Amino acid sequence: QVQLQQSGPELVKPGALVKISCKASGYTFTSYDINWVKQRPGQGLEWIGWIYPGDGSTKYNEKFKGKATLTADKSSSTAYMQLSSLTSENSAVYFCARKLEDDYFDYWGQGTTLTVSS
Amino acid sequence: DIQMTQTTSSLSASLGDRVTISCSASQGISNYLNWYQQKPDGTVKLLIYYTSSLHSGVPSRFSGSGSGTDYSLTISNLEPEDIATYYCQQYSKLPWTFGGGTKLEIK
C-alpha cells in the first residue's frame, strides 16, 4: 500500500535551516510528483511546490521561492524539503503528498512539525 | 492567486443528519476542485476530486457538486468518524490554493 513517512518534529533556531524528509513506499517513486503543503496552527493549507522525482524537475509557489528547496533521492525513494533563513513565520506543520496526473493529492504523509524558536 | 472561501468555519450537526459544506472561488475554476478531510489527529485524506468524483475507498455518503465559482461537499447520514475539518482546493490555476476549512462537530 502507498505510504509516505515523514521525518520527526524539529526545533530549530531563527536564521537556521532545516531539511524535512518524506520516504515513499508501495509505488514507483519516480512516476509521481511529490508536493509539499504548509499548515500554520489553526490556519488552512498552503501549497509550497512539487518535485517530479523522475527527472528532478520542480515547480514552486512564488511565495516560497528562495525559502523552500525541493530535492529527491531516487535510490532511497525519499523526497526532501529544505527551508532556509527560518523565522517564527515558518513554524508550522509541513505535509508531503503524492499528486496524480489529474492534479489531486491522493496520499499524504503524517506531517512534520517545525518549531522555530530561540 | 485564486482565493478560495469557506464562509462557514465551523458547523455542528447531529448523527444521521445531511450536512452541506460550501466553498466559493474568487473566479471561475471550471470544476477543478478537490475536497480533503483532516481528522483531529492531523491525518489528511482525499475525498472528492474534479468536483464530484469519489476517491477510491471513500464512503458513498460523501458527494460533491458545483460549477463556476460555487462548490459544495455533502455528507448524507452523518457518522461519528466524519468529525473532521474539510478543505476545498482549486487546481485551475497555479498556485493551487485551499479554502480556510470547515470544522464539523457533533451536536
Image (spheres, coloured by chain):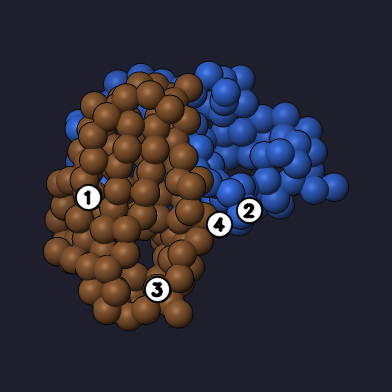
Q: Distance between the residues labelled 4 and 1?
A: 35 Å
Nearer the observer: mark 1 or 2; the answer is 1
Tag 2 secondary structure = loop
Marked residue chain, label 1: B
Q: Indicate the position of residue A3 as horizontal and vertical percent values.
A: 30, 55
Residue depicted at x 75% and y 41%: A88
Marked residue chain, label 2: A
| Mark 1 lies on residue | B64
Q: Quadrant of the C terminus of chain B?
A: bottom left
| Mark 3 lies on residue | B13
Can the viewer see residue A4?
no
Q: Which chain is in blue here?
A: A
Q: Distance between the residues labelled 3 and 1?
A: 18 Å
Q: What mark, if any, has residue A8 been given in the picture?
A: 4
Crowd tier of the residue under label 3, counting other residues whose Cα lies within 10 Å: few below 14, some 14–19, many 20 or above: some
Q: Quadrant of residue A50?
A: top left
Q: Quadrant of residue B38?
A: bottom left
Going by the numbered disc 3, the residue's amino acid type is Ala
- For this rendering, which residue is in front, A42 or A77? A42
Residue depicted at x 14% and y 64%: B60
